[in-house]
Amino acid sequence: MDTDDLEPLKAKPKPKNLEPMSVDELHAYIAELQVEIRRVEEDIARKKKHLSAAESLFKK
């Protein structure tokens, strides 16, 4: 049983107010978001690999 199914859904975070940010700060913010996107993509790939391994184990 997956415990993620039992946890309540988290509220979406409020969008960051970009208005007071300078161009340099916006570029830095984009870089931070790109790092986070890569981290999430790596986690998705890892989970797909585990799922594939589990599926192949149970198909035999």
Image: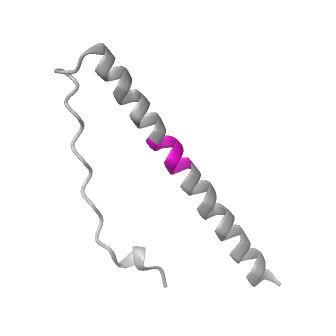
Position of 53 compared to 14: left or right?
right
Q: How many labels does the image show?
A: 0
Res 55 quadrant in image: bottom right
Identify the magenta region: 36-41
Q: Residue 50: horizontal and vertical position, in percent? A: 65, 69
Q: Is the magenta stretch mostly helix, strand or loop?
A: helix
In the depicted structure, whether residue 14 falls above or below residue 25: below
Instruction: Name the residue located 41 percent from the left edge and 79 percent from the top edge.
Output: 3
In the depicted structure, whether residue 13 falls above or below residue 23: below
Q: Residue furthest top?
A: 23
Instruction: Name the residue located 47 percent from the left edge and 35 percent from the top edge.
Output: 34
Instruction: Name the residue located 47 percent from the left edge and 39 percent from the top edge.
Output: 35
- Does the stretch in magenta take in 4? no
In the depicted structure, whether residue 22 falls above or below residue 35: above
Q: Residue 37: horizontal and vertical position, in percent? A: 48, 42
Q: Residue furthest right?
A: 60
Q: Residue 23: horizontal and vertical position, in percent? A: 30, 14
